[in-house]
Amino acid sequence: MKEYIKMIAVLSAITAVCGFLLASIKTGTEERIEEQILLNVKGPAVNQVLKSSTNDLIKDRKEIVINDKKYVVFVGKKDNNTWAVTFESGGGGFGGDIGVMVGYNLETDMLTGIGITTHKETPGVGSKVTGNLFTRNFTDKSITDIFKIKQDGGVIYAVTGATISSKGVCSAVQKSIALYPEIKEKILEE
Amino acid sequence: MEKTLTKEFTKGFWEILPPFRLVLGLCPVLAVTKYAENGIGMGLATTFVLLFSNIIISSLKSIIPKKVRIAAYIVIIATFVVIVELLMQAFFFPIYEKLGIFIPLIVVNCIILGRAEAFASKNPIYLSAADGLGVGLGFTLSLFFVGSLREILGYGSFLGMDIMWETFKPFSFMIEAPGAFVCLGLLLAVINLISKK
């Protein structure tokens, strides 16, 4: 009996200490990890869609709350004038959600471009939606355009053999455009 | 047989060098050695876990009941693996991204549980630390060696720099999974040949 109690006590004590240690390290590194993800996963896409900006895009990010949901908005500035914003949105692709960073020019309400942040599409087929050949479809389109593939009556040329992936990106862009007016309003308020 | 600090430290580099002499921990050897750089990253992460789990297990050896020792060891090892994962994510993000799932898989790396069971649970703390560090660094060197070989032959580069002559055609078999097996097998054969007296 005494042996059982000792086993239970020792194991519980070890797991409790380990749990506490992990929780404290997790809180300690949380902020830095978030920053690293922004820099390494979203950074390249953000820099691509807002490429003519002169400010530090990652550092000048803002958090905007719409309908209790938090959006990280990256603001592009040229000579201290805010000219463009971008934020991430997602759409269902072939292998899972596709993360799409959509950039908007605040003056003309046109898309400055899109960049794919994360995806699980088939390498060599669906993954082609990350390439410039597909993403440049979206550049300099107006937000009033129909962001669907050509077969569905839209303005986007789908990647051959990757219709579902292409539609996923389109739906992410549509969701993003639905949010854009509110985000624009809040950015211009500041 | 007398146990000294240097002896316990240096045995990891030849006498029980993983994965060649101690044929354990083959999964990361096969999986992450496409590039020499990945090999170093994986090796150092394993060394960190090995060193600290050895120290903790050795210092707790008298209070851990025999019957639940494996469960206790795994909890301790898993804790250090998560710590190394979080630290790599925070400070070495690019290499963390490349290693991906293989960082959490260090938990099931036989070398670590093997050293805990075979050495740390029977020896004093300072010897266990030397053992963990030695075996870990030996593992790092092995991964680096396999990684360099595969990177040089498979990509024609070393640590990301092109080093082969211009007309060199990369031997892309080496960077595929079967290439890893062949590479490891040949190295094992060579090492057995050397160590056979």
Image (spheres, helix red, strand yellow):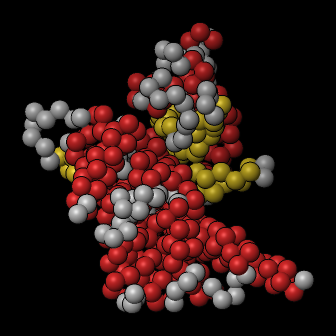
Q: For this view, does B82 lie left or right of residue A84?
A: right
Name the residue at 53% across, 61% down: B110
From where the camera sits, is residue A32 visible? no
- Give the number of marks: 0
Q: Quadrant of the N terminus of chain A?
A: bottom right
Name the residue at 73% across, 74% down: B68
From where the camera sits, is residue A94 visible? yes
**Height in image: B137 above or below B101?**
below
Q: For this view, does B7 lie left or right of residue B105?
A: left
| Residue A92 image point, x, y percent | 66, 31
Name the residue at 61% across, 26% down: A94
Q: Quadrant of residue B53?
A: bottom right
Q: Quadrant of the C terminus of chain A?
A: bottom right
Front-lying residue, B41 or A177: B41
| Residue B54 image point, x, y percent | 53, 79
Front-lying residue, A9 or B49: A9
Front-lying residue, A73 or A7: A7
| Residue B139 image point, x, y percent | 38, 64
| Residue B78 image point, x, y percent | 62, 67
Q: Quadrant of residue B20?
A: bottom left
Name the residue at 46% across, 89% down: B126
Q: For this view, does A3 lie left or right of residue A99?
A: right
**Height in image: A142 above or below B24?**
above
Front-lying residue, B179 or B5: B5
**Height in image: B179 above or below B6?**
above
Query: For the view shown, which residue lies furthest in the right direction?
Result: A1
